[in-house]
Amino acid sequence: MADQYKVTTTTGWGSRIGNSIKGIFFGFIMFIVSFGVLFWNEGRVDVSEIAKTAVEISATTQAPANSDGQLVSTTGVLKSDEKIGDTYLQAGDYIAINRNVEMFAWEEEKSSTSKTNVGGSETTETTYTYNKNWTSHPESSTNFAKQEGHLNPAMTLGANSVAVQKATVGVYNIDMSQVTLPSDKGVQLTAANTILGDGLVLAGDQYLFKGTGSLASPQVGDLRVSYSIVPNPLSTATIFGKLDLTNNMISPFYGEKNTKLYRIFEGSRDSAISTMKTEFTILTWILRGVGFFLMWFGLMALFGPISVFLDVLPIFGSISRGGIGAVTFLVSLVLSVITILVSMIIHNLVVLAIVIVATIIGSIIYMKSKRKKQVVTAVG
């Protein structure tokens, strides 16, 4: 049987109208912010386009002097002479180590159903469901609707990250304090590469475990620790950055709008550029969606008092709410598309110049055509 706790509340019609009027302010803010989000998003720099302009140099030989200070890319072996470890992981051949700690803890899920009553009041039944899961960010029990029986203790062990101080890609040094490293990979844990202590025991080949239960049957408060690493060496690594021949280094490059490009990828230059393009495209569409929904929800909030007022007879409130939702959806969709297109033009100077010139030429042609018709009419 599900572990649930239910709370039923009733809000009067007058209070609902007051809340909906307050919502107009927040709706207006969301509506205005949506344009800012959409406009800013279309002006973001596609770092993959910057990466395409990088001069490709060899990782095994010194680059020519005329490449100094330029954006470059090179593909070679990422390696370091250092060996690093963690409190519970023996020092070894790693470029970077990430310790991931999870606690078996209570999690609260909230769901609500509302019913509008004749007279405009609203009855809401909120159901809080409690489940136990592994999580790296356990919720504080003080925030639960029902704290009794759902106590999460404080985590006694935290996550940690460590990386080598010096590394190279081919013959070039890397500034490890600023570079973005490739995605890490899980590491297989054994008795030979782990350091057991503080109550931790080896549990399989992925986790260290600490607690009163077991990995297969954990209790609330139990911990499991796993590691992910960037291996040393990484045989095929591509780095983008500014070439500094004085220090024989590839350092951070700053391009259009001060966009930073200083990143190492596993794999070839082409696959790295493809990855950056995919990341940019996904984020672009996410932000477009955010802008659209901010606009839609903002508009619905602006007209919210109408539906609440009509809720004195629930059928009327329901009909108005559906109608307002449909109309504001279409309006938001049209405004979002227009905003995106206009933003694209404004942020693209070439396109903007073409539009301006085309507008001027079109206006001149139209005015000449209009004058010619006026002359013909006067002569006739």
Image: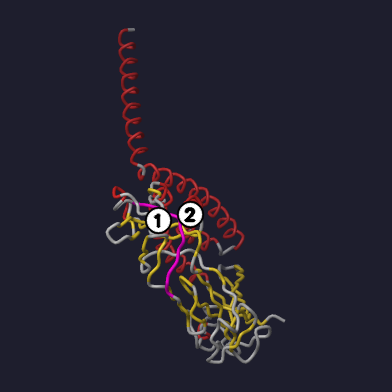
Magenta stretch bounds = 71-82
Secondary structure type for disc 1: strand
Tell me which amino acid carries mark 1.
Answer: Phe
Tell me if residue 92 is in the magenta stretch: no
What residue is at 31 percent from the left and 24 percent from the top? 364
Residue at the right extreme of this rendering: 1
Q: Position of residue 309 (x, y in %)?
A: 51, 62
| Above-or-below relation of 208 to 262 | below
Report helix, strand or loop for mark 2: helix
Residue under label 1: 240
Q: Which residue is mark 2?
A: 272
Q: Are marks 1 and 2 in contact (CB under 8 Å)?
A: yes
Classify 68 as above or below 155: above
Q: Residue at x 65, y 84 (%)?
A: 215
Instruction: Tell me: 294 left or right of 128.
Output: left
Dot 1, how many residues are within 10 Å of its Cα: few (below 14), some (14-19), or many (20+)? many
Residue type, mark 2 in image: Ala
